[in-house]
Image (spheres, rainbow, N blue to C red):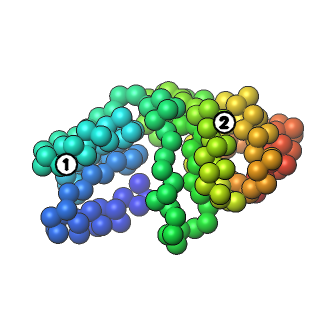
Amino acid sequence: TFSARRAYEIADRFRARGIPVVMGGYHPTFMPQEACAHADAVVMGSAEGQWGRIVSDAKAGKLSRIYQTETLPGPELRRYDMEIFRGKKYHPLLPVEFTRGCRFQCEFCTVSAFSRNTFIIRPVETVIEDIKQSGAKRIFFVDDNIMSNKAEAKKLFTMLTSLKIQWGCQISIDVAADADMLKLMAQSGCIL
């Protein structure tokens, strides 16, 4: 939401040049009519299950105004082509997604509303392989709460130890009560 105004400015510039714009993410999901004023199409919810259809519709010149996804994708749909970052001057942190959603279903939280109170997790081995293939030495896990599944998080942190990387994440404060988990995180390269 904090970047919506700037996103709208960029979208308006592209549309003024005749380039179709598709918007998605949290803000457009919760404010689709507002987003529609600046985009040719709006994706409500996760885009993975819709993206092929959106691209086909765009090629045919028949974008729908709203594409709505009812459920989160399965773990198999959550592997991304990291080649788009090569040669770019982005911050040297590689974004990696391990989980989506959160075990806490707080009624005030956008994460729960966006994910429709569901939670998915990628296989730890797949995440580790993605990190190895990237060659990155600094990772940021973009998960909403990387400890949503404590057992899988522990498995991930254990496997990260051998990679000798630095990493950061978003995590719920309840981790502060788990000294063993904090120690494992530090040993595995957690710096944030």
Find disc 2 in the rendering and name its residue: 125
> In the image, what residue occupies the spot 48% across and 50% down?
81
| Residue 66: mark in rendering | none
Instruction: Give me the C-alpha separation between circle 2 and circle 1.
Output: 35 Å
Residue most extreme to the bottom = 89
Name the residue at 41% across, 54% down: 1
Q: Give the percent coordinates (x, y) of residue 57.
A: 18, 43
> Where does residue 189 sit, x and y in percent of width and height?
78, 53
Relative to residue 7, is residue 174 drawn left or right?
right
Horizontal side, residue 5 vs residue 73: left or right: left
The outermost residue toward the left is 61
Q: Say few, some or many: other residues with alpha carbon within 10 Å of mark 2 (under 14 / 14 to 19 / 20 or more).
A: few
Q: Tell me the quarter of the image containing the C terminus.
A: bottom right
- Please determine whether, in this image, residue 30 is positioned above or below residue 75: below
Please state which amino acid type lies under the numbered disc 1.
Ala
The answer to whether residue 176 is seen in the rendering is no
Helix or strand or loop: what does disc 1 sit on?
Answer: helix
| Residue behind mark 1 | 58
Instruction: Report the front residue among 172 and 73.
Output: 73
Q: Amino acid at mark 2?
A: Glu
Residue positioned 13% across, 46% down in the render? 60
- Determine whether, in the image, residue 42 is placed left or right of residue 93: left
Residue shown at the point (33%, 33%) measured from the top left: 69
